[in-house]
Amino acid sequence: MKGPVGPFFYSKILLSVTGVLELGPWSSVMMIYRGAILSTLVFYFLMSFLNIAEWTGRGLPVSSFMSMFAMVHIIAKFFNLVLRRHKLVRLIESMSRLSGEVSECPRSALVLTWYASRSNRMTVAYTTIMAVILSSRAVILCSAEAGNATPLRLIPDSFEFNFPVDVFMETFIMLPPMAIVIREHNLLMTFTMQISAQLKVLNDAIIGLSHFSYDQEEVRKHRLRQSIRIHGTIFRLVKEMNELFSPVLFLETVLSSTQCCLSGYSISQLNSTDPSLPTNILMLATTLLLPFIICWCGSQIKEESSRLYNAVYGCGWEDFKPKDRKDILIIMTVATRPMTLNFKNTFIMDLEKYSNAFEEMQDRIARQFSPSEVRVHEQDPMDKSLERLNEGALRPC
């Protein structure tokens, strides 16, 4: 439990490396690295644009539009992390200080350890999944026939197809953007797990206020002041997270939903033997995974913060002194609206919104795949009687 981040081992490494690279002596090296990434992103965008220009009049270049949409939100992530890196470092420092304060609360060691192990598993698993998706894409491209350029090919068709060079270029183009996405989502999951752990410790501390007797009034008052301070810090940190991440997360959620629809449309136009089907399925899986991570983080914070109201209500606040009762009622009033990841307090990112969007998309794809049925309607009795009369009139006498 030593250190400001506590047992968040992988998270501590991630946050420490981020802080050193952003503002430490390596900042000049990071500027060169960012310049290389930005040039790669611009090259990726131009390749997608040229691919769309070549496809004019030959159908809808779905994959190129998907690539351009991906570049829009990845470039937004890039500039967000570059221009707001000072806010990111301040958020990391505030999170570390809060973790140190929370570790002084009773029964916090077990909670922090459990959430830390969960955070470590999630960041490692997410990084592994994204690495598998990238390597699978490279393997599929390498195993494809040299004459069959997939619809997800990023190099325009006017360029001569040189298979080793093409595979290397596409893999090289994909690595920097995905590194930006993986880094930001790992930071988001790390912050989410730490805030969830701190909210859990805060809930336990507030519930424990009812266990103090009257002769322990000073200890209870100290714990109450500590809980109020921790709650205010958590509330401020969630607000800073929204200011830092919510604009690009909102853009990513909207564009990823559009990419999901384009992927479903592209898959519906292919047959099972098409060589480009695996790459389209990988793209669909990626566009489903990215908004799921964002919405899961929002639901995690919302779920933990929604329990705070019940904890405050059941802490025996009616037995407190008037001054302490006023402070605890302020927390109860604030807790009536759970903390969430949201954009301008209008677009809330949680799993409920994700499931609604996914169900709607699933219905649209199902309607796209459903074959046109020829429905045989039953004839009206009046029509049947008219047919009999016509048959009798045409029958020879």
Image (tube, helix red, strand yellow):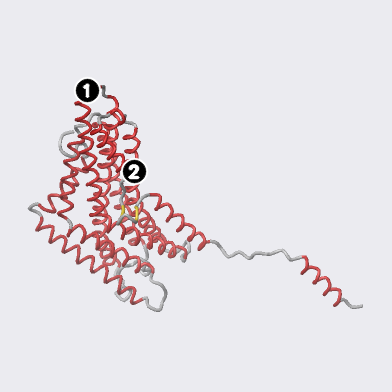
Q: Is residue 320 left or right of residue 82?
A: right
Which residue position holds label 1? Answer: 216
Quarter occupied by residue 171: bottom left
Count of labels shown?
Answer: 2
Which residue position holds label 2? Answer: 336
Closer to the N terminus: mark 1 or mark 2?
Answer: 1
The kind of residue tagged 2 is Thr
Residue at the extreme top = 215
Q: Is residue 211 left or right of residue 376?
A: left
Residue in the image at 28% along x and 55% along y: 246
Residue 298, x across and y down, in percent: 32, 48
Task: Give the structural element (helix, strand or loop) at label 2.
Answer: loop
Task: Give the structural element (helix, strand or loop) at label 1.
Answer: helix
Residue 251, x across and y down, in percent: 31, 60
Residue at the extreme front = 322
Residue at the extreme right = 397
Q: Quadrant of the N terminus?
A: top left
The kind of residue tagged 1 is Gln
Residue in the image at 81% along x and 69% along y: 385
Question: Which of these two is toward me, 274 or 292?
Answer: 292
Q: Is residue 371 above or below residue 234?
A: below
Quarter occupied by residue 2: top left
Q: Quadrant of the C terminus?
A: bottom right
Question: Which of these two is toward me, 64 or 239?
Answer: 239
Q: Mark 2 and mark 1 in contact (Cβ < 8 Å)?
A: no
Residue 314, x across and y down, in percent: 34, 31
Residue 245, x across and y down, in percent: 25, 54
Gap between marks 1 and 2 measured at Cα: 29 Å
